[in-house]
């Protein structure tokens, strides 16, 4: 079967370079390289300088493969062509994560959104449940890529490890729908899920907001919005995974890891330009806002992530304001690791670890409320 030039070009991006599907877009300047022109990744040995960052062996292998593949320019036209592909086709090109695995229920639901109908998908390991909380999950992809389908594996893993229903959200993407479309959809989805458990055959008593990368940013923004104007049920926890938290300034980790660690400054700058966020808006930079009375939080970063220091800063501010907070940093891991678990096998252990921390925190919250 013949394929269009747009589809072939999309495959060049989404096949060998599907890592970009999980990225968050922030305004990154040109940074110093930590890899040579051929993309060779520097890893730490006992003889190397203490300043040299540790990179896990399976991450080294992943990065070598990533940089070995030429990448076409990531243009507005290319993104629009990718958005026009069938969702299943895009997901098939992005096979770096583990499969969904056994689920008792996978159910698609449509809700009315700010810009039109929005797709939601329920993942649950149990056919029936007593009333309880639900996880609302926002996929990553730099606000320009990603979908329910590309992130089905991690949504299912969250459902499995937390033993909770997970509702994954399909929000509008740039460049067709720039800022603040994604965050408006994210808030609307949380409010709708809170009030419409029956649409999923469930009785929801609370919300746990979570998302990776760009979705981590949507998590923080939606949690603040629902703190200030509560939904039908309360937000009982948030689990932002390597989130963008501050568009207004650059951080040291952005310079240290902007090149050679997959989250490329040039591509992210292009994504950021297409998303066109207002850096001073709290809908883009939740770190700039008041964090008092935010929900208990498990915040995840990776030690080799340009966004690492933004995550650290947000977690530190939560602690300073008295919000119960657990901070987890994956040592020797890169941005996007929770959705690269097939290609970076050791990332599965870290994903299970931070989800177990979230489950423990939730158990404590439920015990305190009794």
Image (spheres, rainbow, N blue to C red):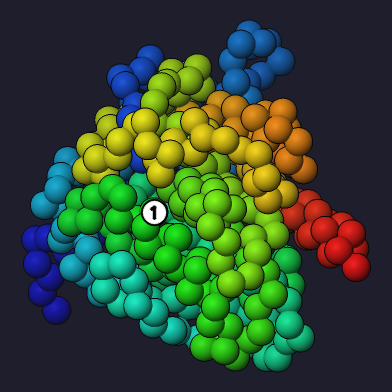
Q: Position of residue 289 (x, y in %)?
A: 52, 35
Residue 64 vs residue 137: left or right? left
Residue neighbourhood size for the residue with mark 1, other residues' Cα within 10 Å, grouped as few (<14), some (14–19), many (≥20)? many
The N terminus is located in which quarter?
bottom left
Q: Position of residue 255 (x, y in %)?
A: 43, 18
| Residue 166 vertical placement versus 315 (above, below) | below
Question: For residue 237, which quarter of the picture?
Answer: bottom right
In the image, 357 versus 11, the foreground residue is: 357
At horizontal 41% and vertical 44% (from top left) the residue drawn is 283
Question: For residue 278, which quarter of the picture?
Answer: top left
Looking at the image, can residue 275 be seen? yes
Looking at the image, can residue 64 be seen? no
In the image, 131 versus 260, the foreground residue is: 131
In the image, 78 versus 38, the foreground residue is: 78
At horizontal 15% and vertical 45% (from top left) the residue drawn is 75
Q: Which residue bears the numbered disc 1? A: 183
At horizontal 51% and vertical 66% (from top left) the residue drawn is 190
The C terminus is located in which quarter?
bottom right
Label 1: which secondary element: helix
| Residue 330 vertical placement versus 236 (above, below) | above
Residue 112 vs residue 229: left or right? left
């Amino acid at each position: 079967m013949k394929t269009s030039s747009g589809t072939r070009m999309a495959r060049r991006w989404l096949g060998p370079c599907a890592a970009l599907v999980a990225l968050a877009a922030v305004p990154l300047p040109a940074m110093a390289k930590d890899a040579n022109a051929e993309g060779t990744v520097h890893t730490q040995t006992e003889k190397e300088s203490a300043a040299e960052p540790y990179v896990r062996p399976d991450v080294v292998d992943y990065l070598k493969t990533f940089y070995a593949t030429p990448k076409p320019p990531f243009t507005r036209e290319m993104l629009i062509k990718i958005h026009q592909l069938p969702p299943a086709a895009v997901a098939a090109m992005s096979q770096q994560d583990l499969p969904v695995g056994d689920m008792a229920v996978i159910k698609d639901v449509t809700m009315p959104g700010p810009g039109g109908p929005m797709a939601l998908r329920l993942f649950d390991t149990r056919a029936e449940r007593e009333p309880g909380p639900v996880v609302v999950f926002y996929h990553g992809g730099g606000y320009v890529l990603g979908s329910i389908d590309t992130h089905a594996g991690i949504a299912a893993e969250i459902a499995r490890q937390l033993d909770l229903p997970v509702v994954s959200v399909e929000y509008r993407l740039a460049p067709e729908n720039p800022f603040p479309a994604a965050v408006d959809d994210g808030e609307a989805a949380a409010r709708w899920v809170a009030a419409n458990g029956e649409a999923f055959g469930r009785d929801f008593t609370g919300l746990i907001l979570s998302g990776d990368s760009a979705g981590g940013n949507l998590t923080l923004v939606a949690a603040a919005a629902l703190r200030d104007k509560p939904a039908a049920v309360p937000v009982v926890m948030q689990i932002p995974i390597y989130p963008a938290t501050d568009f207004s300034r650059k951080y040291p980790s952005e310079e240290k890891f902007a090149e050679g660690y997959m989250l490329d400054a040039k591509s992210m700058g292009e994504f950021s330009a297409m998303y066109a966020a207002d850096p001073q808006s709290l809908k883009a930079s939740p770190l700039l806002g008041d964090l008092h009375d935010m929900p208990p939080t498990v915040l995840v970063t990776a030690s080799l992530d340009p966004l690492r220091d933004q995550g650290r800063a947000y977690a530190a501010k939560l602690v300073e304001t008295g919000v119960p907070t657990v901070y987890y940093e994956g040592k020797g891991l890169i941005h996007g690791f929770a959705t690269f678990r097939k290609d970076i096998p050791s990332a599965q252990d870290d994903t299970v670890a931070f989800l177990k921390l979230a489950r423990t925190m939730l158990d404590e919250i439920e015990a305190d409320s009794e």
